[in-house]
Amino acid sequence: MATDWLAENDVLSEDQEALRDAVSDIAKKYDTQYWIDVDESGRYPQEWVDELTEAGWMTMLVPEEFGGGGASISDGALFLETLNRWGGEATAIHAQIYQMTTILRHGTDEQKKKWLPQIAEGLRLQSFGITEPDAGTDTTRIKTFAKREGDNYIVNGGKIFTSRFMQTDLMLLLVRTERYEDVQKKTDGITVLLVDTREAKENGQIQARPIKVMDGHHTNELTITDLVVPVENRIGEEGKGFRCILSGMNSERLLVASEYIGAGLWFIDKAVAYAKERHVFGRPIGQNQGVAFQLADMAAAVDAARLLVWRAAWMARQGLPLEKGEGSVSKLVAGETAVRVTEQAIQILGGNGYTREYPVERWHRDAKIFTIFEGTSEIQRLIVGRAVTGLDVR
């Protein structure tokens, strides 16, 4: 088993050790075969999600005053890391952990009192409609438009790669309330709305088309037609929504980076076990430098990435600004490390690693998204480059 230096070096508090152990107890129930079945059927891991929800983990970051767990961001990172540490897929639920922070940071007191207790009780907020066919990295180019009519916005447009839309009750939706060509500063005129997707699905105002992807990620293309959203569901100021999404990016990125660490640790375990069990020329292949050195590289890379994630999580917990791109550094390094480690694990398993009879190929497909969603590796480099140089790197 990969070394858990967090515990060995007293990095974790007693409460965090208890958190890790409790989450591990749940995660271990869902073995390799469970995740193979989920992958092959293409279904959502509802049983796993239900158990995590019933245990209260899904709302751990909601403040206690609103009925949540009141946990810290480092607790959230440990939770997500632990899920993947035992072969789970934290991508299926991670948005429920952090998307409510948009309401927490930018919502009015009335909105917090209305929505956060409901989320703490199990109302699902798992989707954020941002990306459009012609607006990915350049978010300012979105065309989905919300026209105000009295106390409502009427929204028309479309989104793509909107994850977990069929598994959510609420969705944050990024729209334009002023068109791109009508604003001087292109980040202006963008607004965040909170949408009750239960109503929108029933009345056909939002229609979803599932997009088939290379792993078990559940994502959709949305067509939005005359969607009615009350003005009272606007989060933050009208036209200033771009600031709302930027303010939470660092914490979101370090949280998803923690998932990648868990995946890396899981891969190391699988590769080490195989290297000990597989015998060639009368000895375990792990005795060969060619294999042992790969395992050493894997362990070193994951440990280094883990330190970056935990540094960022510690800073966030202390209220320190992540102004040098620490969240982006975490995601960049952890994501690319996870992808590289999956490739090394498959190489160690050889032909068996290439088959679906062994679980590593599934995670290899899953891991590729780590360098794409929540901001591509290229965007993370851009952010870090700007922080390092102080220049407007493009």
Image (cartoon, grey):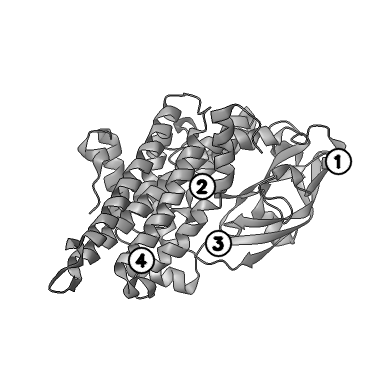
- Between circles 3 and 1, the one closer to the viewer is 1
| Left or right: where 242 falls relative to 267 | right
- Whole-number angstrom distance, CA of label 3 to CA of label 4: 25 Å
Q: Residue furthest left?
A: 282
- Between circles 1 and 2, the one closer to the viewer is 1
Query: Residue 389 sits in which quadrant?
Result: top right
* Amino acid identity at mark 2: Gln
- Whole-number angstrom distance, CA of label 3 to CA of label 2: 14 Å
Q: Is residue 27 at all visible to an observer of this figure?
A: no
Where disc 3 sits, the SS reads: loop
Q: How many marks?
A: 4
Label 2: how many Cα within 10 Å (few below 14, some 14–19, many 20+): many
- Whole-number angstrom distance, CA of label 4 to CA of label 2: 31 Å
Label 4: how many Cα within 10 Å (few below 14, some 14–19, many 20+): many
Instruction: Name the residue carrying label 4.
Output: 346
Q: Quadrant of the N terminus?
A: bottom left
Q: Residue at x 77, y 34 (%)?
A: 188
Q: Residue at x 48, y 38 (%)?
A: 329
Instruction: Name the residue carrying label 3.
Output: 218
| Left or right: where 17 falls relative to 373 | left
Residue 10 lies, in percent from the top left, at 23, 33
Label 3: how many Cα within 10 Å (few below 14, some 14–19, many 20+): many
Label 1: how many Cα within 10 Å (few below 14, some 14–19, many 20+): few
Residue 181 marker: 1
- Whole-number angstrom distance, CA of label 3 to CA of label 1: 33 Å
Contact check, label 3 and label 1, Cβ < 8 Å: no
Instruction: Name the residue carrying label 2.
Output: 96
